[in-house]
Amino acid sequence: MSKATNRKIKVDPTIIYPDSDGKPMADNTKQYQYIVMLHTGIDSHFANNPNIFVAADLLWYAVEGWPSIRVAPDVMVIFGRPKGHRGSYRQWVEDDIAPQVAIEILSPSNTKAEMDEKLVFYEKYGVDEYIEYDPDRGRLQVWQRKGRKLMPVVFGKEWKSPLLEIALRLEDDGELSAFHPDGRKFLTAVEIDQLAQREHARAEQEKARAEQEKARADRLAVKLRELGIDPETLR
């Protein structure tokens, strides 16, 4: 992982680092769904660690004074930085800690040249794990840092991230599934909402059942008192 460097932050007010590059988060619904699923799942996995920042479609400015040196990974994970809202990730303001994990979900508009440039960027500026998934081709590729280089990882249908501790699996139909360390599958936003609805319905049923049991017990107590029996003596 990248190491923090302690230095005084210098801010040049004449240099502007825009919070947006004017590009959409996703080009289609499938790409968007994967971005949201992975961001939500990873963020949930690290929810109890205040010093792991997970972001989606956030501009990362790697070098102070050079706003053109930037990229917006679909998902990025930074160990050693606090959670919180940011307009962009300016590395020199963040103890000079580079994102250790970058994830890209391809769309038909992404060219090979563009993705090759991103790989070079991630290699040069400190990413330790780079994950790239192409939904249209059903292709998952992973690179890990070996010294100064990002090297391709050879794996079968499933790969477990040493840093994220999650598993990524290519299903037979080419769809990508992700799993928490305990085996729970990452859910889409719709699946999360459906699960919440089922849990709410179950809780309501339990509440109604408890209320019925209490009403039954109250009626029984009334009957016992009518017979001159103290219900408390039967407990």
Image (tube, helix red, strand yellow):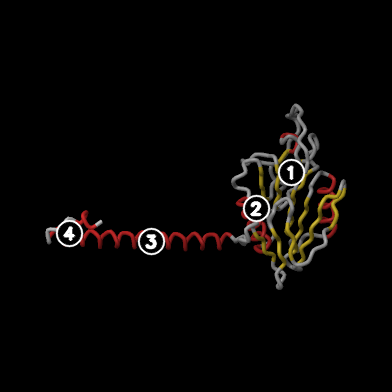
Mark 4 vs mark 1: in front: 4
Mark 2 vs mark 3: in front: 3
Which mark is first along the chain, 1 or 3? 1
Label 3 to label 1, Cα distance in Å?
A: 48 Å
Dot 2 amino acid type: Ile
Label 2 to label 4, Cα distance in Å?
A: 55 Å
Q: Secondary structure at mark 4?
A: helix
- For disc 2, the neighbor class at 10 Å (few under 14, some 14 to 19, many from 20) is many
Label 3 to label 4, Cα distance in Å?
A: 24 Å
Which mark is first along the chain, 4 or 2? 2
Q: Toward which corner of the image does residue 140 lie, by quadrant? A: bottom right
Residue to which mark 4 is pinned = 222
Instruction: Say if mark 3 contacts mark 1, CB within 8 Å.
Output: no
Residue to which mark 1 is pinned = 60
Residue to which mark 2 is pinned = 42
Label 2 to label 1, Cα distance in Å?
A: 18 Å
Instruction: Say if mark 2 contacts mark 3, CB within 8 Å.
Output: no
Instruction: Say if mark 2 contacts mark 1, CB within 8 Å.
Output: no
Image coords of residue 233 (percent x, y): 21, 55
Label 4 to label 1, Cα distance in Å?
A: 70 Å
Q: Toward which corner of the image does residue 124 lie, by quadrant? A: top right
Residue to which mark 3 is pinned = 206
Q: Residue at x 80, y 42 (%)?
A: 68
Question: In what quadrant of the picture does the C terminus appear?
Answer: bottom left
Dot 4 amino acid type: Val
Which mark is first along the chain, 3 or 2? 2
- For disc 3, the neighbor class at 10 Å (few under 14, some 14 to 19, many from 20) is few
Look at the picture and state if 170 lies above or below 12.
below
